Amino acid sequence: MSLDGARFEALFEVIEALCLGDLQARFTCSPDQDDIDAIGYALNVLAEETQHARAELQRAKEEAEAASRASRVALARQCELESLKERLVQMLIHDLKNPLTAATANLEILSMTPPLTPPQLEMVEEALASSSRMQRMTLDILDVLRLEGSTLEVERAPIDLVGLARESLAGLRQQARGANKRLRLAPPRGGIDRRPPEIDARLIRRVLDNLLLNAIKYTPPDTEITLECGLEEDGAVSIGVLDQGAGIPEAQRARVFEVYTRLAGERHARSSQGLGLAFCKLAVEAHGGRIWVEENLPEGAAFRVRLPGPD
Amino acid sequence: MNEITLKTLTMSVTLLEERVIYIHPLPGTTQTKQDAEENLEVVVRELGSNLAVLVDARGSGVLTREAREVYAQREGYMIAQALLVESRFSRIAANLYIRISTPRHPTRMFTDQDAALRWLRGHLR
């Protein structure tokens, strides 16, 4: 074999090894640096670069995998902390509920126990109203947490919705009177008074209370608040709370149902500690329904609820 | 101006004129990353930085990938680099350096030394 023949052979061996995936294979250039060396050198450089690029790619892949693992761990930790926080809040609120119930019951007994002077009675009634409000707030917080965590069961049973609406209005009439507002129940529609819908009475009663309280709180004195309820043609339950206040700008309507949201630019922002309307949304959605707010012409807001009927 | 010539294990360096140096890699050598770093250190220490560099790639030694990376990417020591080539080997080596190592500084291949120097001086202005 000639000298060139041997060098060609060596060159082909390197090419063959590279083709088989051995990126370490290199051609040994001679001091002559002739054309065979030129080919060999080019192969060496290309093999080195390929090897380097492959190593870089592998490194980047490993880094990405490590980052993804770290982010999964961090996410799991964050979820764990969130869940712990929620459980703690839930426990605290739950522990608040019992003393509040006892205080409210005692105040109720006290308000009915003579002889109380008119100023004493007024003080007891104020205390009773405050403790009732706190009770409602604790229930809202508990239920919002349960509904967000999907741990609250909707207990459906046939209920007298008109009766429920009357109870809600009766419970809030004194508060409305104190704020110089009138509460009114519109005539029931669609025969709802004869066909009891299957809904969770406890949750929907609090939806009614929250919507009415919201209207009492954020509308001017000497106005009327109307509660409507009815059955649609498709069997869906419709509820409406209509007020004569300033209304809610269209751009902000979706946000009123967010937790702890207050609308910008309103002196009396429409939210009940940011929870009342959020509770309403979650409770309605737990029934598979929808809640929204629209204009109540000629002025005011109309909060509307639609709960789907039986399939 | 008197010519100053320095020698390292893998190359000789001559200061041709102010801020223009001529590098001649020693034949039969393979420069590693360490060689490249030592060479640059000597050049900067003895001849300064922001130099116009003429590399004689005719019949020269070769560079490892890491050494090419050092020369191509290190900042501060040069403003432009002319590669003097002749054989097919040196042209291929220079082309691979320009295309694959993609130097940060203006780099061009020349077969004529005077043309290379004129181009380098243009970068000194």
Image (tube, coloured by chain):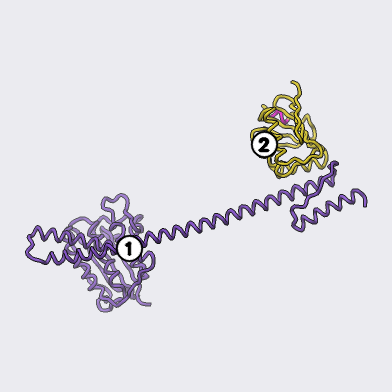
Q: Chain of mark 1?
A: A
Q: Position of residue A229 (x, y in %)?
A: 27, 70
Q: Which residue is mark 2?
A: B105
Q: Position of residue A169 (x, y in %)?
A: 21, 67
Instruction: Indicate the amino acid at tag 2.
Output: His
Residue extending farthest bottom: A194
Q: Which residue is mark 1?
A: A91
Query: Is disc 2 in contact with disc 1, using a CB cutoff of under 8 Å?
Result: no
Q: Which chain is purple?
A: A
Q: At 75% across and 40% down in the image, what residue appears? A: B31
Left or right of B107 on screen, residue A72: left
Is residue B87 shown in magenta? no
Q: Colour of chain B?
A: yellow
Residue extending farthest right: A1
Mark 2 and mark 1: Cα distance apart in space = 67 Å
Disc 1 secondary structure class: helix
Q: Position of residue A94 (x, y in %)?
A: 30, 64
- Magenta segment, principal secondary structure? helix
**Residue A259 lies in quadrant:** bottom left
Label 1, residues with CA under 10 Å away: few <14, some 14-19, many ≥20: few
**Along the line of sight, the residue nearer the viewer: A306 or B104:** B104
Left or right of B78 on screen, residue A12: right
Compared with residue A264, is residue A311 higher up or lower down, i.e. above or below? Answer: below
Q: Which residues are magenta?
A: B119-123
